[in-house]
Image (tube, grey):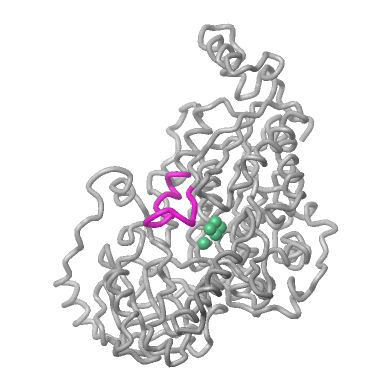
């Protein structure tokens, strides 16, 4: 790499700062207005620190200080760092769903990188949508970047019990609905389930996506496993700053890192970790930004052949991300499966993935299992097809009761979340454990934004009888911390006339997981009659972001990116990149 180092005048920022003309005079004088001298910024890589901090994003509450660590590292390595805010897209508060705004973050990141004089960028993210949003945007911008993952929060804790983000909220909520938890206990759980800065500490979407970023070569080795409040996280942040300066001199652009092999590696690692179903949508979107072919069938194949070796909830039984870190973290996990990975892939370090895994060790083989003793031999993820989901649907076999793997029962269909919520709270609802609960109009356009409604609540009538799982189907997503026999991401979605729109209460639905089928047992002629009679619902938006989202969002099997942001749209030939 050293031999190909750029000289200062070859830096991208030199186009803004170098020339002796009026425009560049303006740029230099404005930096001086900010209190910097030429010694601070001339002939140095200018590093953008894209920070998704917000006071309503508890997962990123440490990012204000971490940005300072990054800047310290940049300065030490001879670069000049400026911090730039990015929309935060927090998972906790954004309504109707943060997914409505992932593409907004991606667009913002891409345009802010492209329009400013950055030679390199540190992306600070972690809460679910921020990793794919930032990575998608930065891939399209094409400037060297490094990903700084927020890190998981500490284990939850209450009354001698360890609590896992999301997963235990759902679990104890069902117990509360069943009348088994007092107000005081509930308050204790509320205060104990999220104890520090950092992302959800189950293997939910956040930790799956940061693992994907690391496996793709976009983070420093081991970065994705470090708990947010560990001092190692501060040191890693400064290391990101130091390293990105070299990346800028080396011109180590993301197209050299995010290759087809790197995407393939990331998909395998995702499966081995237990993989939030959301990873499917985001990984496909990232791949398409990179111009790499990745579809549901390829992911199903990897799901069948990759053992799940991270014993981390919700797919694993016992542990949380803090335990995973102490057990050796993602490097140790990747070391277990390195024979399946293309270890020649280049990473942001300038070294290969294989070199980054050297010396990685498992310190607790109950948390990170050997291949000879996986949590599940296969089954992080399965893709279904059938007359209910011609373009695919997704299920997480490891997180559902095996008795539902082959199941047939009458559908109980709801057109909206509000309607379904009312019904499931009715203790007299006519429902049996064999029923199949269905929610439609919850997809990318219908939700809108494909909310995480897919872990449909079990009807109270069944809860009272002691049931905690049933077959559920929707065109929604579900939280990576969720579990149960939930078929998700049905494509095409009901709102745009997918077959889910034609299903009626009482129709028999059949799931055959071993054969990857999901069908309604309804005569073809009857389905055709219903299609004739189907009336599209009124659009959700007449203006604004939502309108643009509805016009351009792709279906779940394509990653829910905007069609015009995919690689194939690209830059016009010969157009400069600034
Ligand atoms: Fe931010 Fe779960 S709410 S990662
Ligand atoms: Mg989540």
Q: Nearer the viewer, residue 445 or 176?
A: 176
- The answer to whether residue 459 is seen in the rendering is yes
Identify the residue at horizontal 43%, vertical 85% (top origin): 470
In x, y percent, where is residue 96?
37, 57
- Residue 262 in view in this figure: no
Image check: 404 left or right of 333?
left
Label count reads: 0
Q: Quadrant of ligand 1?
A: bottom right
Image height of 250 relative to 208, above or below: above
In the rendered image, residue 404, in percent from the top left (x then y), is placed at 47, 87
Q: Relative to residue 420, is residue 59 drawn left or right? A: right
Residue 125 versus residue 459 in the image, above or below = above
Give the extent of the magenta segment: 89-105
Which quadrant would residue 252 be assigned to in this image?
A: top right
* Residue at the limit of the structure toward the right, as seen here: 359
Residue beneath the point at 80% across and 71% down? 364
Residue 183 coordinates in the image, percent (x, y): 50, 74
Give x and y (percent) for residue 397. Answer: 53, 79
Q: Quadrant of residue 488?
A: bottom left
Q: Residue at x 51, y 11 (%)?
A: 23
Q: Residue at x 41, y 61 (%)?
A: 556
> Does 95 appear in magenta?
yes
């Amino acid at each position: 790499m050293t031999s190909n180092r750029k000289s200062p005048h070859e830096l991208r920022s030199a186009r803004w700062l170098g020339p002796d003309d009026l425009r560049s005079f303006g740029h230099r004088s404005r930096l001086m207005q900010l209190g910097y001298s030429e010694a601070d910024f001339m002939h140095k890589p200018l590093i953008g620190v894209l920070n998704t901090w917000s006071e309503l994003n508890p997962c990123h509450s440490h990012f204000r200080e971490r940005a300072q660590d990054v800047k310290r590292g940049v300065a030490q390595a001879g670069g000049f760092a400026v911090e730039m805010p990015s929309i935060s897209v927090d998972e906790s508060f954004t309504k109707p769903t943060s997914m409505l705004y992932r593409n907004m973050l991606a667009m913002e990141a891409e345009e802010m990188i492209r329009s400013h004089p950055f030679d390199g960028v540190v992306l600070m993210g972690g809460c679910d949508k921020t990793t794919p949003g930032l990575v998608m945007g930065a891939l399209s911008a094409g400037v060297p970047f490094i990903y700084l993952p927020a890190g998981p929060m500490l284990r939850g804790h209450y009354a001698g019990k360890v609590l896992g983000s999301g997963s235990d909220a759902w679990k104890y909520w069902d117990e509360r609905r069943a009348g088994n938890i007092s107000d005081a206990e509930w308050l204790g759980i509320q205060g104990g389930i999220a104890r520090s800065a950092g992302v959800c500490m189950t293997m939910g979407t956040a930790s799956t996506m940061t693992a994907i970023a690391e496996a793709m070569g976009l983070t420093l080795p081991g970065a994705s496993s470090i708990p947010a409040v560990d001092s190692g996280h501060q040191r890693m942040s400064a290391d990101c700053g130091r390293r990105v300066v070299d990346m800028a001199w080396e011109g180590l652009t993301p197209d050299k890192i995010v290759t087809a092999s790197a995407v393939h590696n990331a998909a395998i690692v995702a499966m081995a970790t237990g993989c939030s179903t959301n990873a499917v949508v985001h990984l496909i979107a990232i791949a398409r930004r990179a111009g790499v072919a990745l579809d549901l069938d390829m992911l199903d194949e990897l799901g069948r052949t990759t053992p799940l070796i991270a014993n981390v909830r919700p797919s694993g039984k016992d542990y949380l991300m803090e335990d995973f870190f102490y057990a050796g973290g993602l490097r140790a996990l990747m070391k277990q499966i390195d024979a399946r990975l293309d270890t020649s892939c280049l990473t942001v370090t300038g070294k290969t993935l294989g070199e980054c895994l050297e010396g990685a060790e498992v310190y607790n083989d109950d948390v990170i299992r050997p291949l000879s003793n996986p949590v599940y031999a296969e089954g992080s993820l399965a893709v279904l097809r059938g007359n209910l989901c011609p373009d695919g649907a997704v299920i997480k076999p490891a997180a559902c009761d095996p008795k539902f793997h082959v199941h047939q029962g009458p559908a109980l269909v709801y057109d909206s979340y509000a309607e379904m919520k009312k019904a499931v709270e009715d203790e007299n609802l006519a429902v049996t454990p064999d029923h199949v609960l269905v929610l439609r109009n919850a997809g990318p356009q219908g939700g809108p934004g494909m909310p995480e409604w897919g872990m449909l609540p079990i009807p109270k009538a069944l809860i009272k009888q002691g049931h905690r799982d049933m077959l559920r189907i929707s065109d929604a997503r579900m939280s990576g911390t969720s579990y149960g026999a939930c078929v998700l991401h049905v494509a095409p979605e009901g709102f745009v006339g997918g077959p889910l729109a034609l299903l009626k209460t009482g129709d028999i639905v059949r799931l055959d997981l071993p054969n990857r089928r999901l069908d309604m047992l309804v005569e073809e002629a009857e389905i055709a009659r219903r299609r004739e009679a189907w009336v599209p619902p009124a659009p959700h938006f007449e203006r604004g972001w939502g309108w643009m989202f509805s016009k351009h969002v792709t279906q779940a099997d394509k990653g829910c990116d905007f069609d015009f942001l995919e690689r194939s749209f690209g830059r016009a030939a010969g157009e400069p990149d600034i």
